[in-house]
């Protein structure tokens, strides 16, 4: 099994209006294996004309899809949930091939990602408004919920399945049609997902997938079209700001899940062993290539050495290699540029005075690999504490007081995820109220959950995905004034 068997002979093309087709002009886009730099396969490289065709299909399908009974929409999601679950190993191997993560890691993503389909299959039938008497009497107030309309989804390369299902699930449940542009590095999983949804009975035109290398032109073209009503993007803050600006002329609804710089705070009363366990999850999930990854380890000076030594032993025991090979714990990063970025941050931190506990040296051989690395005594203003690392590096900075820890944690333009280890309940409450982040994990290194609202504040964006809140992003509220009699 290598995962490519999930894709039929036509499934490396564009999926528009329920049909697989070639890109205008027949252009193709290579998909590279990050474990050795070789070409896995190629897919259609869609043009701007193809993008408009996809929006045309979404617009044509919108009215009928909005009128489809919620139960039917939910049943399609539930069927797709079952199909993906049955093919979990195939999806896991496919993601491992195109993105680099281990098969075990990819299986975890399948379990997480497909749960959005089950969750929103159940939420589809719970969309409701309200009926009430006007406070002054004499009339009735009715509110009803309607789908926003055609959406554009731009998904990142690091979670090829979950970042799609997290957007597609609530949109289908709410009655919205969509155009999806997956990352050009990892388009295969989205193409496989489109095939599964078609098999599950999703009507033609509800979901349209365009793979393309024309990133900025693609979004600019569709956002200039007044038929597009919403954009949901997961990716860098810089690109997110461009999309926000482009949305202004048409006043499109937006969900922006952008960059992160998550603090991982370990207080003096923490269970250090439990904190190390949590750190391994928060840091090493997806080789550190996650917006929720612990980026800065803020550890009380009294336990910093113990924490660093124990974390270093755990990190040094991980095996680096191809994600599909047995016994491998850490796969490659996505590309050469990612390796260069991580390596430069580590080099700068060492120059600033940090001590290498483990790792820090590039391995030889093919592929885009970087070793699990722990750095101690990293200055608070070192660039590695400012930039999103997106790699398997844990920089440890010390603090003395609770106020200092909170101040250091909040001293970032980002506000997505954060983690706190302490056994003091009162402190837990104070910290939860003081941290400027959309999500806080208390004594836990894993916070993502389809039943919870995922999203950030400040430069990490706005809007929420998942939970009860997630479907509201795809609904408009209409108020109807009714006479009393």
Image: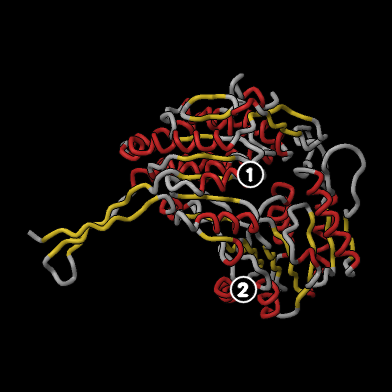
Q: Quadrant of residue 310?
A: bottom right
Residue 330 appears anywhere in the view: no
Q: Which residue is mark 2?
A: 424
Foreground tag (1 vs 2): 1
> Extreme top residue here?
9
Give how far across and how far down residue 129 sits, in percent.
28, 54
Other residues around mark 1 within 10 Å, as few (<14) / some (14–19) / many (≥20): some
Residue lying at the far left of the rendered structure = 485
Label 1: which residue? Answer: 215
The relative height of residue 235 versus residue 183 in the rendered view (above or below) is below
Label 1: state its secondary structure: helix
Please state if 201 lies on the left or on the right of 308 as rendered: left
Asked whether, in this view, residue 187 is left or right of residue 78, the answer is right
The structure residue drawn at horizontal position 60% and vertical position 28%, both measured from the top left corner, is 23
Q: Residue at x 56, y 65 (%)?
A: 457
- Looking at the image, residue 387 sits to the left or right of residue 68; the answer is right
| Rendering quarter of residue 348 | bottom right
Question: Secondary structure beneath disc 2?
Answer: loop
The circle drawn on residue 288 is: none
Quarter of the figure that contains the N terminus? top right
Quote the CA–CA distance across marks 1 and 2: 48 Å
Residue 270 seen anywhere in this rendered image of the structure: yes
Label 2 crowding class (10 Å Cα cut-off): few <14, some 14-19, many 20+? few
State the image coordinates of residue 10 (x, y, percent, origin top left): 59, 21
> Split into 4 quadrants, where in the image is the C terminus?
bottom left
* Point 33% across, 48% down: residue: 146
What residue do we see at 78% from left, 52% from top?
392
Task: Please count the marks in the image.
Answer: 2
Indicate the position of residue 52 as horizontal and vertical percent values: 51, 37
Q: Where does the image place residue 25, in percent across and percent down from the top left?
A: 63, 26
Which of the two labelled residues, at mark 1 and mark 2, occupies the earlier sequence position? 1
């Amino acid at each position: 099994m290598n995962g490519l068997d999930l894709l039929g002979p036509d499934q490396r093309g564009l999926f528009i209006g329920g049909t697989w087709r070639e890109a205008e002009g027949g252009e193709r886009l290579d998909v590279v294996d990050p474990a050795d730099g070789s070409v896995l396969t190629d897919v259609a490289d869609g043009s701007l004309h193809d993008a408009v065709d996809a929006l045309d299909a979404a617009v044509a399908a919108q009215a009928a899809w909005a009128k489809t009974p919620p139960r039917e929409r939910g049943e399609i999601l539930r069927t797709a949930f079952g199909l993906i679950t049955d093919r979990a190993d195939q999806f896991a191997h496919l993601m491992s091939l195109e993105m680099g993560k281990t098969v075990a890691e990819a299986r975890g993503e399948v379990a997480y990602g497909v749960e959005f389909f089950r969750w929103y299959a159940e939420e589809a039938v719970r969309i409701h408004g309200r009926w009430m008497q006007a406070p002054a009497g004499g009339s009735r107030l009715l509110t009803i919920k309607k789908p926003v309309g055609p959406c554009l989804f731009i998904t990142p390369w690091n979670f090829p399945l979950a970042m799609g299902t997290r957007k597609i699930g609530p949109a289908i449940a709410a009655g919205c049609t969509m155009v999806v542009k997956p990352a050009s590095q990892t388009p295969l999983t989205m193409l496989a997902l489109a095939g599964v949804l078609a098999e599950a009975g999703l009507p033609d035109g509800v979901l349209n997938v365009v793979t393309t290398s024309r990133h900025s032109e693609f979004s600019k073209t569709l956002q200039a079209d007044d038929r597009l009503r919403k954009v949901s993007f997961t990716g860098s803050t810089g690109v997110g700001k461009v999309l926000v600006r482009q949305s202004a002329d048409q006043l499109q609804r937006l969900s922006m899940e952008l960059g992160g710089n998550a603090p991982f705070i370990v207080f003096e009363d923490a269970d250090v062993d439990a904190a190390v366990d949590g750190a391994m999850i928060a840091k090493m999930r997806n080789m550190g290539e996650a917006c929720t990854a612990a980026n800065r380890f803020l550890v009380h000076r009294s336990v910093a050495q113990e924490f660093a030594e124990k974390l270093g032993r755990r990190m040094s025991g991980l095996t680096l290699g191809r994600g599909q090979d047995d016994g491998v714990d850490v796969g490659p990063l996505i590309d050469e540029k990612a390796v260069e970025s991580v390596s430069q941050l580590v080099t700068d931190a060492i120059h600033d005075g940090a001590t290498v506990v483990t790792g820090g040296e590039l391995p030889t051989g093919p592929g885009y690999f970087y070793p699990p690395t722990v750095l101690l005594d990293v200055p608070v203003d070192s660039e590695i504490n400012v930039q999103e690392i997106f790699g398997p590096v844990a920089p440890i900075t010390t603090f003395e007081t609770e106020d200092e820890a909170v101040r250091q944690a909040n001293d970032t333009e980002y506000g997505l995820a954060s983690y706190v280890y302490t056994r003091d309940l009162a402190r837990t409450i104070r910290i939860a109220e003081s941290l400027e982040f959309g999500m806080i994990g208390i004594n836990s290194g894993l916070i993502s959950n389809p039943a919870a609202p995922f999203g950030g504040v400040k430069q990490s964006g706005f809007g929420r995905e998942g939970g009860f809140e997630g479907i509201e992003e795809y609904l408009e509220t209409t108020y109807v004034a009714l006479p009393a009699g």
